[in-house]
Image (spheres, grey):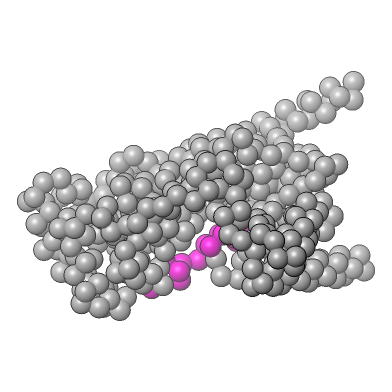
């Protein structure tokens, strides 16, 4: 009978969670936070469609030479922006060449494949040509990095790390990890274009920035601008998921493509709404990496255990000790990244990391003592 009551209770929580999702998905979340991952260049604000347009009429992406020539002429208005970014003559020329379709970005990247840490498959890395990389770094420094992100976002940010991402989930009854499949390639060039329009750039300038920061119609993993662009595009996702999770007294964080939700048993009922938001934002869940974890088993968030305190898993510590032992004996020692042999510098780096985690635990204990008083 008690089990039936629990089931009814969960159903009620699930219904409330879906109602909250419906409310969040139809409410404007303040520019430029709301969702803009639609297929056409149209803004959806409070149920009203607003077509993106210029003084010459509705803007269409350049599809023929005449439009490309017009776009090239209009790019001259970008000179103050490019000067503010501190571009050299060579960099300015390349920027204009890409924006006017004189140069295709496909030849400006070096593609390589790196084995994933779990050993399952390879990750495609597209590293930009030196000059293009410098341009992208300046776009990041001047335009993208000053923009505030959601508090729940911890990846690719200064003063944030896997530890700050894991801290909100320490000592929780339920922890749920959700991995987004093909995170960077899922973000299309039209999403990047819309982002720059929402940052206040003209439609033509936004199109130019889109061409300079994307590759083959997607966000390239390996470009200096890609992590920041991904974080900005995910602000809508973060705000909507956080709103739903807060509704069931839970905690939510995101580190790149890793989403984590934690709290009491009630957070499980929020999962259908969270999944619906992820789908609505244009992302897909990697079902193989969907991990609900109870307190009775090891709970891990971005590589750190969070059951009672923040810690590096026992398995990782043992593997590290074994690798260091082999290193001291003069044998080939591999740890964590099997493609890179262990070195003195890497050993010192991991020891510093362990010390940082230890300090974070001391902070947690101090806060718990203050709360207890």
Read off the magenta span.
142-156
Residue 143: x %, y % from top left: 38, 69
Residue 152: x %, y % from top left: 61, 57
Report which quarter residue 141 is drawn in. Answer: bottom left
**Secondary structure character of the magenta stretch overall:** loop
Residue 243: x %, y % from top left: 61, 48
Q: Residue at x 86, y 41 (%)?
A: 296
Q: Residue at x 52, y 41 (%)?
A: 121
Residue 146 is inside the magenta segment: yes
State which quarter of the image contains the N terminus.
top right
Of the pair 125 and 223, the residue shown nearer to us: 125
Task: Please identify the residue farthest to the front as the structure is shown.
Answer: 330
* As drawn, 92 above or below 74: below
* As drawn, 162 above or below 20: below
Of the pair 100 and 148, the residue shown nearer to us: 100
Does the image show residue 244?
Answer: no
Q: Residue at x 61, y 45 (%)?
A: 118
How many numbered discs? Answer: 0
Q: Residue at x 35, y 66 (%)?
A: 133
State which quarter of the image contains the C terminus.
bottom right
Report which quarter residue 71 is drawn in. Answer: bottom left
Residue 274: x %, y % from top left: 60, 39
Residue 149 is inside the magenta segment: yes
Q: Is residue 67 left or right of residue 354?
A: left
Of the pair 299 and 52, the residue shown nearer to us: 299
Q: Is residue 121 left or right of residue 56?
A: right
């Amino acid at each position: 009978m008690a089990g039936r009551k629990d089931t009814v209770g969960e159903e009620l929580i699930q219904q409330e969670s879906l109602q909250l999702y419906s409310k969040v998905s139809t409410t404007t979340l303040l520019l430029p936070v709301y969702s803009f991952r639609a297929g056409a260049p149209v803004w959806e604000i409070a149920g009203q469609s607003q077509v993106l347009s210029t003084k010459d009429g509705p803007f269409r992406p350049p599809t023929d030479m005449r439009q490309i020539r017009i776009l090239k002429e209009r790019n001259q208005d970008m000179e103050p922006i490019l000067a503010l970014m501190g571009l050299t003559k060579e960099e300015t020329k390349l920027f204009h060449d890409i924006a006017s379709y004189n140069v295709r970005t496909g030849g400006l990247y070096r593609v390589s494949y790196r084995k994933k840490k779990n050993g399952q498959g390879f990750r495609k890395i597209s590293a930009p040509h030196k000059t293009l990389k410098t341009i992208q770094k300046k776009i990041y420094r001047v335009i993208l990095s000053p923009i505030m992100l959601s508090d729940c976002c911890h990846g690719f940010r200064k003063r944030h790390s896997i530890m700050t991402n894991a801290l909100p989930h320490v000592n929780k009854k339920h922890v749920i990890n959700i991995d987004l499949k093909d995170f960077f390639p899922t973000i299309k060039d039209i999403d990047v274009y819309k982002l720059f329009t929402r940052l206040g750039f003209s439609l033509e300038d936004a199109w130019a920035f889109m061409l300079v920061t994307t590759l083959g119609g997607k966000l390239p993993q390996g470009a200096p601008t890609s992590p920041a662009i991904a974080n900005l595009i995910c602000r809508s996702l973060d705000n909507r998921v956080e709103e739903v999770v807060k509704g069931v007294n839970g905690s939510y964080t995101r580190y790149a493509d890793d989403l984590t939700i934690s709290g009491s048993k009630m957070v499980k009922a929020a999962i259908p709404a969270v999944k619906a938001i992820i789908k609505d934002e244009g992302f897909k869940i990697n079902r193989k990496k969907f991990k609900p974890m109870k307190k009775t088993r090891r709970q891990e968030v971005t590589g750190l255990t969070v059951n009672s305190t923040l810690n590096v898993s026992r398995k990782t510590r043992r593997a590290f000790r074994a690798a260091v032992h082999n290193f001291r004996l003069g044998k080939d020692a591999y740890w964590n990244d099997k493609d890179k042999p262990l070195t003195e510098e890497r050993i010192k780096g991991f020891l510093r990391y362990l010390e940082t985690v230890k300090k974070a635990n001391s902070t947690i204990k101090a806060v718990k003592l203050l709360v207890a008083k």
